Every structure is written in structure tokens, then in C-alpha cells.
């Protein structure tokens, strides 16, 4: 019979039979049958470990008697079978008593009351308590469900049940009786609406209190008398990846409350454990005395449970009992403070014993006073018979013949006193102890230990796991030495699994608060960088397993790509460099649609289970940090592709796009919704609108007709960095570049991307306009220089030369048409305009260096005002073109224009805007400076006073001129304008038009609905697979798990299975949301059914429908290999 089954029958039921005997401790006779308070047990499972804790003091064992400390979480693999804290001493110097928990428990739940009696176990507060610091008792329960998905899955209960217990324990936290909490309001008393229960900074805390006053319990354990000890236990840990995520911490606080008011002398305390590192038959124990770390490891390279990657796990004795020395140089830690004149006793001894070993190495006898003495000997670092542990003669160098710290050699180097010299690999127990000390009446002592795991993943051998365990222990010691500083929680992404027809969608963008918390992670060294998405072969697989496939990595765009760091080659043990994360600066994404099995490269099958994980990672660029990235903990997700449930009508599928209507505004923006979860869509009409923040930046909102469901959304890029609401990923895109569009006919075929165009003959050129790119205009430049060597753009003299302010904002830029007047003149200076031409405009003429002497004599008549550089000169018909706002092409509006002349030898000062020919002008940017200004202002034939000052003089009114565009182009050769008729030649300027408060988009979502009438029709699809069942099902994990699956079932159904003789073989009552129901191919007596034809009647009362199926079962020949 397998070892865990033996333990089940011998240990019995820990909850219902708390004093039941394990085969490891006796024969199981005369068991005490008492019921513990409710709940009497819970699980610590906030990180990569999961273990059972009971308020009678037991831990690390399942209620069914199997190993209960699971590592890694969800793997169903365990390094510990059972653990407990034990103490022993002499009440007032009398007989030895031993209590605590070691298979049996000498403790019962509840406090010791002031009168020296024990609290009634029927009291409401006699239970075990568990809290999470981020699931407060006052929170809306529905909003907490996503957070507790890992616990619900681990415990096999609903999220609502987990949240309800968390909140009850939060609100009823027994702080008055010693349970720790963070006193946020600093008033010295616990207030559940303000304070935070639990060990300060911990992500999850378990607390309970018990006592050793029950005479029967004490006798049943080791045949000794009560000492009057009250024990308060705090167990806590952190939801962190890395070392802190592979450990938990235990604080045992013991108080002498015996009614005789007597001291307990010669007292010892010990952390005892029965570790079963996977398979229990091949284990070794070791102790690192330099670290106070005792551990279990696999004697062989391979383990029957863990395979070739067995972990190492153990306990570190952080804080021993406090004793008074009165020496100023001594310091002790006690109740999270340092006490001068005291010291903490270290681990003063360790021990181990062997299941089935010789007399010195056997378990202490239970239910007998001899057992108390034997365990007391162990606490002194001796064998149970009172002898110090012999040091084998094979140990070299051998400096002593006996020791109270056996197995203190180094398995990594293979030196010293190692397990295996005296005893063969096998089932071990182990413990570390500290003492002696005296616990006076009313005195308190506390002991802190860490329970740590390492390895257990691909590439980590049994010996290297020890090295990793030591490193993890140092990390734990550092946390303890710093009084457990509050680590910044790196929260797992909350992932919704959407099961569709031969398709799975993973969505971690619906819980905005969770996503923001994960992506906002930053601590002293690390900062959030991205997400990895994996497919795993099984629920218990790890990321390091060779079968695990990395499907995608989504990382922020910041120049950081792959994260590379040091590692150890698992074969050679040599240092290597490893890529831990394959970032590509691709941008974040919070959803992925999966259509295939990435492990087999086949299509997904309905009804089959697939396993995925989404992990966030953070990186550091510190040269002092060896670990370059950390991750959130692994949360394996189960997906089962399926058709819609009976009665559910979906009108969309994942990936469908709903384009929004642009109801208001003239932006270039788009809005559309992508269906992520077709079952969550609402059929509502949504509105996208825009606002500006205090910095002038534009953000958008999503409104569902009654409320804002997305707010403060700044992303408008065409990427995947969007959140999901009501099953939809709403994307809003708009230009991210400001000013004139950079593309043109030479670079893009899509006219919507062009920043300029012409009608008639093109009369302008960028050649010689700004050849040095000194002004960085966006548009109308050579293809190689667009964006830096352009010659028209959103710019003004104030923006360039004064304070960088553009009076005309980027959302105010207009689509502009320039209609050129008829000009036949082909020279560069001295043009005459036909003022009767409707396209000859009144313009504001400005002069650079107007306050200087005329650079050429012929310039003098045109320098009218000499107030300063860039001074206004005159407003008259002097611009041979008209400018028009054509945002509404059907109703164009004429715009004001102006220009600059340059009083320099290279200038073209003649009182008229007339850019030079590129044949003669090599630099209109810095030299000639014949610049055109187009205003965001209505055209008039009388001047606007605002525009009649100095363009760049500080405090001048013309700083507020609404100059929208500046052009520094040249004429394209020696040519005139629109020579075939006024307005025939045209030039168009197209700006990027960002979304603004003037814009609005709307769209209507598809629907998902349930129809009872449709459900009656759909249940005709009820079926069973595989059918026939030929001895095996591809979804079965092993030969002990046989089943067929019924599909397309409603929530409630009764399945009756008959053999051909008409005998009812099995009835299955279904009342779950899943459309699937398994039959384990067993009858009412839990025995495998015979091969044959079975008739299945499926009764669906809510639909008023019954369906009959036929199922053929051909069982595989059974060979008994467990007995």
C-alpha cells in the first residue's frame, strides 16, 4: 500500500479526530474523539506555498492524513508531511512535561482565562483566523473576488466563500487577545474600519491561540501533566516572487498561566517536523550550523514524486527565547523590539530520528511518560535515549566523538558528518531546539522560525537545491534582522479565462485597479517592465519545465528589451548567462486570443483542459543587483474551450470589430471596440468623449449611457495597451505627432496621411527652404528629411524665439487651401501685384532687423517702423495668394495672412511677399527669410491691432498674434504664380488633427442573452465523450483516474446510468455553472463498472427535457500495483 494511504488510515481525521494517532507515533488505540471549533483549520497560501494550519497546533498535514505542505503551490507535491512546535520542562522543578504538536497534540483551542481555567471551545472566538491586508472587511465583496481566485482554486471553494471568511475574520480580529495588527490611527486599540489586522506588512496572516490544560490531551500525547501554557501562534508571508514567495514565517508566543502560579524550569522549545520530500523513502536531513538552518533533501538525484528536480526545504531558527544577562553589550529581539541587557538563545541542539530505525533513532513513545523524557532528551540535542549523537569514524576531519548537532556536514561539497553514513535513505523526522530557560508565572517567551523551500523546478538538482535554500535563508534572515520591513507587493495580474468554441481568450485588462497596481510596481531596485504569457502541460507544471511554452511577451516601450542575468548550468554547475525575459519594446497588451495548442501545435479541442499563466515581471538596471528581474508568483489558469451554454445566444465572436461613428468634431481620430469576451457584451450604446487636464493634455472617457466606465485614458496609439470593459477593448486612436502631417505622395499612397497636396501647377519647393533643418518644420520637405527639414509647419516667431508658446493649439489647426493669384513675374525682386485679383490679399508685413540701417539702399523705402527687430511695417494688399479654412469644404472661410522680410544683404525686401527661386536662393531659413504666416483668424481688409506690433518683443501685444503656420519654402524655379488664371494653382496644407473636446464618437455593442426556450432546444446537443470508451481517455492523467465527460448540460441536471439489465449503476446530481460533468466509471460502491453497454438518462428539470444516451465502456485490464 502506498505510504500516503498508510498515513491516512493511521493518522485518521485531523479535524474530526484531533487526537488521532499516526502510525509514526503509535498504534492508534484509544483515540480521543473531540470536535474543534469552527473553522478549526485554514490554509496559508498567499504565495508559492500552500499548507494546512489547525488551531490545535498541528500544521502541514491534510485533513485526509496526506502530506499537507504543497510546494510549488498547485503542484500537489509536498516536502513536508506534518510539523509542529513543541515545548518541554519541569513545573516548579518537578516531573518532565512535554506539550505542543507532534503527530498528537497536547494543546486544545482557546485561551487560558484569568481564573486559570481554559476557555470553552464553543465560544465564538475559539477558531482560527486568517486575513489578507488587501481584502478589508469593509470592502464591497464583489470587487474582491478577482483577488482571491488563487485561494479559491487552491481550497476548492468559491471566491465568495473565501472573501466572506476573510472579511469576517477582519471584522472580528481578536486583537484584544494578542493577535497582531497595524495601528493606523495610533490610538492603541483595534478598529476594523481604520486599522489593518495581521502581522504588519504581511500579505496574509493566520492567527490562533490554544493551551495545554486538557489533562486527557496531555496524557494522550506523551503521558505528562499540563504546565498551564497558553500558546499564541502567528503565521504570515508575502505574495512575492523569488525567495520570499517560497517561504512562510511562524511566531510562537508562549505564556505561563498555570493556576498554581509556579514557574516552568529547565524549559526547552523545539520546531519539530516530519518531512516527506515527495516520496518519503529516499530522504536525508542536514543542518547548516552557520545559518541555524535544518533541512530535508533528496538522497538521490531523482524522486518518485518530484522527478529529477526534488527541492530542499527546512526551518531557520531566527529568534530563540530571551534571557536576561544585564550585560550592556547584549541585545535581544523580543516583540519586534531590541532589548539591551538580554540575549536570545540560539539553537542549542538539533536532532533527527528515523522511521523504523534503531532504538536511539526511533520516535518517542506516545501516551507514556517515557515518551516525554525521550522527547525532552531530543530537545537537548541528544538521541531519545539520552545519548549525544555519535560522530561516525568515517567523518574526516573528526574533531569530536559525539555532538548535539548531528548531520552538520556539507552535502554540496560532500564533506563532514553527512546523513547516510549511519542510516540508509528513508523517512526522517527532524528538529532544532533551544534552552534551557525558566518561564516564570506570567512571563512570556516568543520564538520565530522561517519555513523555506527552494528548487523543485526544472534544471535544479537535489544538491543545487541546497545551495538555493541557503541563499533563500539569507534573504529571510535579512528580512528578520530588519524587523520584516514592509515589501512592496508585486501583485499577480487578475486574469479572466474566456472559454469559447475551440478558442480561449486570456484577459487581464478588465480589473483596472489590479492592472494599475501591477503596472505601477516600483521598489528600491525594481520597476514593472512587462508580461509573459505561457502555456503549461499540466496544472502542476512550472515555467522551467521543458514542456512549457512562452507564447508572448508584452513590455513597455522604453528601450529595454531582453532581460539577461547570471545563472548556473544544471549539468556542469558552471556560471552561465541566461535570458530570463524576451522583451522587444513591443508595448503592453492585456489580452490574447488563443486558437491553438502551442505545445502540440494542434487546434484547441472543446472539452479539453489547457493550462496557461500570465506573469508580470520587473527589472533593475543596478549593477549591484545580481538578479536582474523579479516576477509575480505563478498562478496556473485552467481553460476548457466550449460551445455556448444551453440557451445562451452570442451575436459576436472574439476579435470582432465595432467601428464607432464620429458624431462631433473634425479630428483625424478613430474609435472602435474589439470584442474580447462575447459573453460579457451588453448591447449598450457607448460614447467616447474628450477632456483636457491641468497640463493641457487630452484624455478620453467611455460612457455607457448611465455612468463613466473608463476615465483618464491617455493612450491614443494604435497598439494593444487598452483596458477591457463589458467584454470590449475600446481603442481610441488619434495623431500622436503634432502640426502638419509629415507624409506626402512620395512616401505614402494613403492620401489621409499627406501633409500637403496641389491643384494645378506646383509653384513651391522645399529646395533651399531650410536645408540645415534649423527650424524643424514638420511638412513639405524632402523625403529623407521630413520632420526636420520641412518648409511648412505649425510654428510662429513667438514659439521659436521668445517662450515656446504657441497661441494656436494643436487641436485648432485648420485644413488650409492656398489659392495663388495670377502673377507672370519670374524674377526674385520687384514683383508688381494686380490688386484687382481676388486672391491678392491684405497682409501684415513684418521686418527682421527693422531697427538696423538698410542693408541695401533700395530696401530703405520699405522700412517704415524701426521700433525693433520683427516689427510690423504695414497692412496692405501685398500677398499674392489667399488662404482658406476648408475644414468644412462646403463653406470655406478666408484666413488672415502675413509675411516677414529680412533687412539683410540676402533679403528680398520689396514690400511684397514673393519667395525667391530655388535656383538663386540656397537658404530661405537663415539667409533670405522671406517667410509666409497664415493666421487662425478671419480675413479682413482692415488690420487687427493685435497683429500690428513687434513679433518677438517681450511684453508686446503681437506676442498674442494667432499665427498658425509658417512657410519658408522657395518658388519652384524661375516661374510665376497661377499663370493660366487666378486661383488655378492651389496648395493644400493638412495638419494632424488630434482628438479634442469638440470630438465625440458613439457605438453600440453586440448582445449576449439567455433564452429559456432556446435552452430547451440546445439541450438536444447533450452528449458524452469519448464514446465508445476504449480503456483510456486522452485527458486522463493516470490509470487511477478514469472518466467520461457529459457536455452541453444546463446548470441543473440528474444523470442516471443503467446497465443493460436495467439496474441503476450510478446517479450523478449536477448543480454547477459548468456545462461539463464527469463520470468516473464507478458504481455506487465506488468500484469500477464492468465493460459493456450503458443507457444514460439525462433529466433536465428546469428545461422540462429528458434525453437518453447510449455509452459503450470497454475497461482496460486492471493490474493491482498498490496494496
Image (cartoon, grey):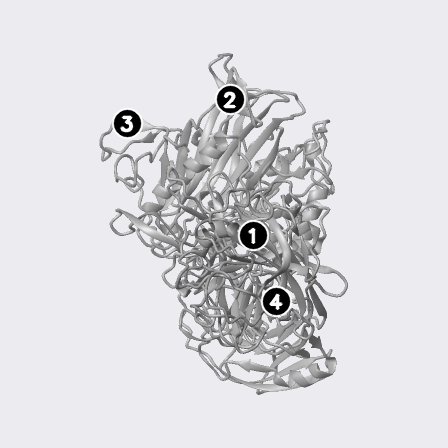
The reply to whether the C-beta atoms of the residues labelled 1 and 4 are less than 8 Å apart is no
Q: Position of residue 989 (x, y in %)?
A: 56, 66
The reply to whether the C-beta atoms of the residues labelled 2 and 4 are less than 8 Å apart is no
> Label 1 belongs to which residue?
862
Vertical position of residue 821 compared to residue 344: above or below: below
Front-most of residues 88 and 958: 958
Marks 3 and 4 sit apart, C-alpha to C-alpha, by: 113 Å
Q: Classify residue 599 by image quadrant.
A: bottom left
- Residue 701 visible: no
Marks 3 and 1 sit apart, C-alpha to C-alpha, by: 113 Å
Q: Which mark is nearer the camera, 3 or 2?
A: 2
Q: Is residue 1048 left or right of residue 1029?
A: right
- Residue 1103 visible: yes
Marks 1 and 4 sit apart, C-alpha to C-alpha, by: 19 Å
Q: Which mark is nearer the camera, 3 or 1?
A: 1
Label 1's element?
helix
Q: Position of residue 312 (x, y in %)?
A: 39, 45
Vertical position of residue 378 compared to residue 748: above or below: above
Decide: few, some or many residues near mark 3? Use Cα within 10 Å; few <14, some 14-19, many ≥20: few
Label 4's element?
loop
Instruction: Give the mark nearest the N terminus, 3 or 1.
Output: 3
Decide: few, some or many residues near mark 4? Use Cα within 10 Å; few <14, some 14-19, many ≥20: many
Q: Which mark is residue 332?
A: 2
Instruction: Give the mark nearest the N terminus, 2 or 4.
Output: 2
> Label 4 belongs to which residue?
840
Marks 3 and 2 sit apart, C-alpha to C-alpha, by: 33 Å
Q: Position of residue 465 (x, y in %)?
A: 36, 46
Amino acid at each position: 500500500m502506498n505510504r500516503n494511504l498508510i498515513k491516512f488510515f493511521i493518522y485518521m481525521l485531523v479535524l474530526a479526530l484531533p487526537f488521532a494517532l499516526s502510525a509514526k507515533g503509535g498504534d492508534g488505540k484509544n483515540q480521543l474523539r473531540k470536535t474543534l471549533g469552527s473553522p478549526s483549520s485554514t490554509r496559508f497560501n498567499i504565495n508559492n506555498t500552500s499548507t494546512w494550519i489547525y488551531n490545535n497546533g498541528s500544521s502541514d498535514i491534510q485533513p485526509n492524513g496526506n502530506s499537507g505542505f504543497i510546494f510549488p503551490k498547485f503542484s500537489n507535491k509536498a516536502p513536508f508531511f506534518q510539523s509542529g512546535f513543541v515545548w518541554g520542562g519541569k513545573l516548579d522543578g518537578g516531573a518532565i512535561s512535554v506539550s505542543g504538536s507532534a503527530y498528537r497534540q497536547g494543546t486544545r483551542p482557546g485561551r487560558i482565562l484569568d481564573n486559570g481555567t481554559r476557555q470553552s471551545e464553543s465560544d465564538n472566538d475559539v477558531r482560527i483566523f486568517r486575513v489578507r491586508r488587501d481584502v478589508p472587511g469593509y470592502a464591497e465583496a464583489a470587487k474582491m473576488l478577482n483577488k482571491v481566485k488563487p485561494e479559491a482554486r487552491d481550497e476548492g471553494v468559491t471566491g465568495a466563500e473565501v472573501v466572506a471568511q476573510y472579511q469576517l475574520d477582519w471584522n472580528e480580529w481578536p486583537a484584544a487577545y494578542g493577535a497582531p495588527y497595524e495601528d493606523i490611527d495610533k490610538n492603541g486599540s483595534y478598529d476594523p474600519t481604520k486599522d489593518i489586522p495581521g502581522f504588519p506588512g504581511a500579505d496574509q496572516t493566520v492567527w490562533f491561540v490554544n493551551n495545554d490544560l486538557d489533562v486527557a490531551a496531555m496524557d494522550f500525547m506523551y503521558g505528562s501533566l499540563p504546565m498551564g501554557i497558553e500558546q499564541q501562534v502567528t503565521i504570515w508571508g508575502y505574495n512575492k516572487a523569488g525567495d520570499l514567495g517560497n517561504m512562510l514565517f511562524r511566531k510562537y508566543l508562549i505564556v505561563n498561566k498555570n493556576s498554581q502560579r509556579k514557574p516552568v524550569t529547565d524549559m526547552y522549545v523545539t520546531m519539530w517536523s516530519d518531512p516527506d520530500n515527495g516520496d518519503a523513502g529516499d530522504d536525508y536531513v542536514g543542518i547548516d550550523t552557520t545559518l541555524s538552518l535544518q533541512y530535508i533533501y533528496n538522497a538521490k538525484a531523482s524522486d518518485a514524486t518530484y522527478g529529477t528536480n526534488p527541492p530542499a526545504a527546512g526551518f531557520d531558527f531566527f529568534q530563540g527565547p530571551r534571557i536576561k544577562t544585564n550585560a550592556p553589550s547584549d541585545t535581544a529581539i523580543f516583540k519586534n523590539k531590541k532589548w539591551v541587557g538580554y540575549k536570545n538563545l540560539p539553537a542549542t541542539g538539533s536532532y533527527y530520528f528515523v522511521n523504523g530505525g534503531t532504538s536511539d533513532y526511533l520516535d518517542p513513545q506516545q501516551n507514556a511518560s517515557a515518551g516525554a523524557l525521550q522527547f525532552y532528551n531530543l530537545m537537548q540535542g541528544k538521541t531519545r535515549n539520552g545519548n549525544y549523537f555519535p560522530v561516525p569514524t568515517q567523518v574526516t576531519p573528526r574533531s569530536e566523538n559525539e555532538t548535539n548537532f548531528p548531520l552538520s556536514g556539507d552535502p554540496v561539497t560532500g564533506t563532514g558528518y553527512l546523513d547516510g553514513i549511519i542510516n540508509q535513505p528513508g523517512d526522517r523526522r527532524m528538529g532544532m531546539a533551544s534552552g534551557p530557560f525558566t518561564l516564570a508565572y506570567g512571563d512570556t517567551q516568543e520564538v520565530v522560525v522561517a519555513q523555506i523551500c527552494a528548487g523543485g523546478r526544472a534544471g535544479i538538482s537535489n544538491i543545487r537545491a541546497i545551495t538555493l535554500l541557503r541563499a533563500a535563508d539569507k534573504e529571510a534572515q535579512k528580512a528578520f534582522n530588519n524587523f520584516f520591513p514592509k515589501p512592496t507587493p508585486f501583485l499577480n495580474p487578475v486574469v479572466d479565462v474566456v472559454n469559447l468554441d475551440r478558442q480561449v481568450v486570456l484577459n487581464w485588462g478588465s480589473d483596472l485597479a489590479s492592472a494599475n497596481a501591477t503596472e505601477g510596481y516600483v521598489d528600491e531596485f525594481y520597476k514593472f517592465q512587462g508580461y509573459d504569457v505561457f502555456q503549461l502541460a499540466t496544472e502542476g507544471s512550472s515555467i522551467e519545465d521543458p514542456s512549457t511554452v512562452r507564447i508572448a511577451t508584452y513590455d513597455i516601450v522604453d528601450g529595454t528589451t531582453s532581460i539577461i542575468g547570471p545563472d548556473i548550468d544544471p549539468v556542469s554547475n558552471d556560471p552561465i548567462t541566461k535570458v530570463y525575459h524576451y522583451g522587444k519594446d513591443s508595448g503592453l497588451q492585456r489580452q490574447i486570443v488563443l486558437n491553438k495548442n502551442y505545445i502540440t501545435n494542434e487546434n484547441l479541442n472543446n472539452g479539453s483542459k489547457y493550462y496557461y499563466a500570465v506573469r508580470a515581471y520587473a527589472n533593475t538596471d543596478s549593477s549591484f543587483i545580481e538578479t536582474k528581474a523579479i516576477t509575480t508568483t505563478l498562478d496556473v489558469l485552467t481553460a476548457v474551450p466550449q460551445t455556448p451554454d444551453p440557451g445562451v445566444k452570442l451575436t459576436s465572436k472574439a476579435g470582432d470589430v465595432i467601428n464607432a461613428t464620429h458624431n462631433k468634431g473634425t479630428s483625424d481620430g478613430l474609435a472602435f471596440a474589439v470584442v474580447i469576451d462575447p459573453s460579457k457584451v451588453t448591447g449598450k450604446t457607448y460614447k467616447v468623449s474628450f477632456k483636457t487636464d491641468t497640463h493641457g493634455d487630452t484624455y478620453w472617457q467611455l460612457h455607457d449611457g448611465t455612468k463613466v466606465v473608463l476615465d483618464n485614458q491617455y493612450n491614443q496609439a494604435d497598439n494593444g495597451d487598452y483596458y477591457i470593459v463589458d467584454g470590449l477593448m475600446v481603442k481610441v486612436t488619434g495623431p500622436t505627432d503634432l502640426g502638419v502631417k509629415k507624409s506626402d505622395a512620395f512616401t505614402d499612397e494613403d492620401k489621409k496621411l499627406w501633409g500637403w497636396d496641389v491643384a494645378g501647377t506646383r509653384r513651391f519647393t522645399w529646395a533651399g527652404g531650410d536645408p540645415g533643418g534649423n527650424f524643424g518644420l514638420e511638412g513639405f520637405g524632402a523625403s529623407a528629411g521630413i520632420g526636420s527639414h520641412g518648409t511648412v509647419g505649425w510654428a510662429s516667431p513667438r514659439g521659436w524665439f521668445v517662450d515656446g508658446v504657441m497661441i494656436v493649439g494643436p487641436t485648432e489647426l485648420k485644413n488650409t487651401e492656398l489659392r495663388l493669384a495670377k502673377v507672370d513675374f519670374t524674377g526674385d525682386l520687384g514683383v508688381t501685384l494686380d490688386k484687382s485679383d481676388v486672391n491678392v490679399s491684405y497682409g501684415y508685413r513684418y521686418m527682421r532687423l527693422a531697427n538696423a540701417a538698410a542693408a541695401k539702399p533700395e530696401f530703405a523705402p520699405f522700412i517704415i517702423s524701426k521700433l525693433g527687430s520683427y516689427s510690423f511695417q504695414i497692412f496692405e494688399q501685398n500677398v499674392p495668394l489667399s488662404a482658406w479654412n476648408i475644414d468644412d469644404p462646403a463653406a470655406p472661410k478666408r484666413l488672415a495672412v502675413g509675411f516677414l522680410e529680412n533687412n539683410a544683404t540676402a533679403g528680398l525686401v520689396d514690400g511684397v511677399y514673393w519667395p525667391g527661386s530655388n535656383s538663386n536662393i540656397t537658404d530661405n531659413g537663415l539667409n533670405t527669410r522671406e517667410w509666409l504666416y497664415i493666421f487662425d483668424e478671419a480675413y479682413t481688409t482692415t488690420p487687427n491691432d493685435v497683429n500690428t506690433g513687434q513679433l518677438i518683443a517681450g511684453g508686446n501685444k503681437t506676442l498674442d498674434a494667432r499665427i498658425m503656420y509658417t512657410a519658408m519654402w522657395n518658388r519652384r524655379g524661375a516661374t510665376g504664380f497661377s499663370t493660366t488664371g487666378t486661383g488655378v494653382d492651389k496648395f493644400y496644407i493638412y495638419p494632424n488633427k488630434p482628438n479634442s473636446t469638440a470630438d465625440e464618437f458613439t457605438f453600440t455593442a453586440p448582445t449576449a442573452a439567455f433564452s429559456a426556450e432556446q435552452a430547451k432546444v440546445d439541450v438536444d446537443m447533450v452528449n458524452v465523450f469519448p464514446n465508445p470508451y476504449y480503456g483510456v481517455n486522452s485527458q486522463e492523467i493516470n490509470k487511477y483516474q478514469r472518466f467520461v465527460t457529459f457536455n452541453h448540460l444546463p446548470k441543473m441536471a440528474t444523470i442516471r446510468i443503467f446497465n443493460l439489465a436495467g439496474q441503476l449503476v450510478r446517479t450523478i446530481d449536477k448543480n454547477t455553472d459548468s456545462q461539463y460533468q464527469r463520470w468516473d466509471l464507478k458504481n455506487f460502491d465506488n468500484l469500477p463498472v464492468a465493460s459493456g453497454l450503458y443507457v444514460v438518462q439525462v433529466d433536465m428539470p428546469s428545461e422540462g427535457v429528458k434525453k437518453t444516451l447510449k455509452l459503450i465502456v470497454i475497461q482496460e485490464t486492471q493490474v493491482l500495483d498498490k496494496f
